[in-house]
């Protein structure tokens, strides 16, 4: 029951996403009166659930890099803060970004827990907030020009044109709903994946239903509920208030938004591009609201920009700016209350030390070690506290300090044969990797990098390849394997040291 209570905030967030972002898939179609709301809600709900379960794993991983929330209480409050923010914005009729709310709430958890925010992951996510609407606008303009040329060439009867447009809206809306589920389920349940409470299930015909997929199914159902119960108002804003759309424009907007969401969610597309040495889109939960608004504005600009209601656009943009800030503040205050009033654990205790082994590791990585010796022997309880000491006592830049902090993190890793047999299985790991782990049975490590260094020395299958576009796919897979092995072999949390 306690697990379900903690998950309730994620389900609340899923409902909020359904009420806000999911409506964007069919908002233009309903707003232009080409499809009834009930039909749109049914199709959207079914395909959102399918997309969540079948394709949700890719984009969900990026949020884990931004902030690896390590306690159910913390995940609960992050999702709750984001959901409250989205609900308030939805009440105001603004199609805000669920992705921005979740990112803001995760950063709030990072601040509260003293965890450094991964600037590379944050930069990647923030860049998509800019690229996503621009890309959607460009796609919308391109698709509209192509559609107009096709219509002029075919010259269909008015009735046939109307019927074809309706069916096309349904088909594209179904595709958009699938893409929305695959991309945005990471926003709804991504924070719970590192602390997933469900075990994997073996299904008939050799199929498996992982704990993460079970989370995604619950989140998909919550999104569907939000679509049915509270999305009609936002559909009106998207479909009619910003720019008056014709049925063909509505079709183009949905198609452009769907393609953008698919590009940032599809692992299969990423693998296909990387396998032939082409750059791929990052798998990041992007905002369907930003995509659809970008597509609508793109069409408006194609028409000369005279019909765009810039006041509505400014209100929407203001919501995008304030959403992460509000979510961050709500999460920080909520975590304080949860921990200090209700005595709920919101993060794991951590410890950091600059031992001689850590300094040697830093030196091997090619970073300057001047000043680290003076800090040797010191112990710290948070990443931020160690980072402050490094900033005052060394000449390391921000990126180097991040790497030193991660190297200094103390944990306990034990190569337990029972856990190896239970968690290190073929399918996820190659035989050489499993043999290397088994050969270390009984060994214990104080830092995660010590275990990984020994595994790398035993077999090249644990080593990362040189960073090239062609190697990115293999390195992504090996990075996941390295994270899995650390999670599988980590034992009980270290005892928190006395404050420095």
Image: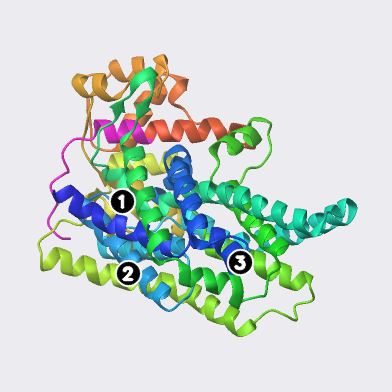
Question: What's the CA distance linking mark 1 and mark 3?
Answer: 70 Å
Question: Residue at position x 18%, y 54% from top?
Answer: 5
Q: Is residue 124 magenta?
A: no
Q: Indicate which label's residue lies in the foreground, 1 or 3.
A: 3
Please, is residue 16 above or below residue 493 in the view? below
Closer-to-camera residue (249/467): 249
Please tell me whether mark 2 sits on a helix, a strand or a loop. helix
Please tell me whether mark 1 sits on a helix, a strand or a loop. helix
Q: Residues within 10 Å of mark 2 (few under 14, many from 20)?
A: many
Question: Residue at position x 40%, y 30% from top?
Answer: 481
Q: Which residue is mark 2?
A: 84
Q: Residues within 10 Å of mark 1 (few under 14, many from 20)?
A: some
The answer to whether 31 appears left or right of 213 in the picture is right
Please, is residue 331 above or below residue 496 in the view? below
**Quarter occupied by residue 247:** bottom right
- Picture quarter with the C terminus: bottom left
Please, is residue 297 above or below residue 434 in the view? below
Q: Position of residue 58 (x, y in %)?
A: 48, 42
Residue 403 visible here = no
Q: Position of residue 4 (x, y in %)?
A: 20, 50
Question: Residue at position x 59%, y 38% from top?
Answer: 270
- In the rendered view, how is the structure colored? rainbow
Closer-to-camera residue (74/85): 85
Question: What's the CA distance linking mark 2 and mark 1?
Answer: 47 Å
Q: Indicate which label's residue lies in the foreground, 2 or 1.
A: 2
N-terminal label among 3 and 2: 3
Magenta region, residue range: 483-500
Q: Main secondary structure of the magenta part?
A: loop
User: Which label is found at residue 33?
Assistant: 3
The answer to whether 92 appears left or right of 3 in the picture is right
Q: Which residue is mark 1?
A: 373
N-terminal label among 2 and 1: 2
């Amino acid at each position: 029951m306690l697990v379900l209570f903690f998950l309730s905030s994620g389900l609340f967030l899923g409902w909020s996403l359904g009420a806000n972002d999911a409506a964007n898939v069919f908002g233009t179609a309903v707003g232009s009166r080409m499809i009834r709301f009930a039909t749109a809600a049914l199709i959207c709900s079914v395909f959102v659930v399918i997309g969540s379960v079948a394709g949700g794993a890719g984009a969900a991983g990026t949020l884990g890099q931004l902030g690896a929330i390590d306690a159910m209480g913390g995940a609960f409050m992050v999702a709750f803060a984001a959901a409250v923010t989205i609900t308030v914005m939805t009440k105001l009729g603004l199609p805000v970004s669920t992705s921005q709310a979740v990112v803001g709430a995760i950063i709030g958890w990072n601040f509260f827990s003293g965890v450094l925010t991964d600037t590379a992951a944050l930069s990647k996510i923030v860049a998509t907030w800019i690229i996503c609407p621009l890309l959607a606008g460009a796609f919308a303009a391109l698709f509209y020009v192509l559609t107009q040329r096709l219509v002029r060439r075919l010259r269909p009867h008015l009735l046939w044109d109307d019927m074809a447009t309706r069916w096309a809206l349904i088909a594209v809306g179904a595709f958009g709903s699938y893409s929305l589920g695959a991309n945005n389920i990471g926003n709804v349940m991504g924070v719970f994946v590192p602390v997933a409470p469900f075990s994997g299930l073996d299904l008939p015909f050799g199929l498996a239903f992982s704990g993460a997929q079970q989370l995604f199914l619950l989140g998909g159902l919550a999104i569907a509920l939000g679509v049915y119960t509270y999305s009609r108002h936002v559909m009106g804003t998207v479909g009619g208030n910003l720019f008056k759309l014709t049925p063909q424009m509505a079709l183009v907007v949905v198609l452009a938004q769907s393609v953008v969401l698919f590009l940032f969610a599809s692992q299969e597309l990423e693998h296909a591009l990387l396998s032939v040495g082409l750059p791929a889109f990052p798998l990041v939960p992007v905002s369907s609201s930003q995509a659809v608004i970008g597509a609508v504005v793109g069409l408006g600009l194609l028409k000369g920009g005279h019909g765009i209601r810039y006041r509505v656009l400014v209100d929407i943009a203001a919501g995008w700016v304030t959403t992460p800030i509000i979510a961050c503040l709500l999460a920080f205050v909520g975590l304080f209350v949860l921990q200090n009033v209700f005595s709920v654990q919101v993060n794991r205790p951590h410890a950091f030390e600059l031992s001689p082994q850590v300094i040697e590791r830093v030196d091997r990585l090619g970073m300057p070690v001047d000043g680290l010796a003076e800090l040797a022997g010191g112990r710290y309880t948070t990443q931020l506290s160690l980072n402050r000491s490094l900033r005052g006592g060394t000449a390391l830049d921000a990126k180097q300090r991040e790497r030193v902090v991660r190297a200094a993190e103390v944990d306990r890793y034990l190569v337990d044969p029972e856990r190896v047999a239970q968690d290190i299985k073929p399918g996820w790991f190659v035989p050489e990797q499993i043999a290397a782990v088994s050969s270390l049975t009984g060994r214990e490590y104080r830092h995660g990098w010590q275990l990984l260094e020994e595994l790398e020395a035993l077999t090249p299958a644990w080593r990362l390849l040189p960073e090239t576009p062609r190697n990115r796919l293999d390195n992504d897979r090996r990075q996941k394997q390295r994270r899995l092995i650390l999670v599988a072999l980590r034992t009980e949390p270290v005892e928190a040291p006395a404050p420095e």
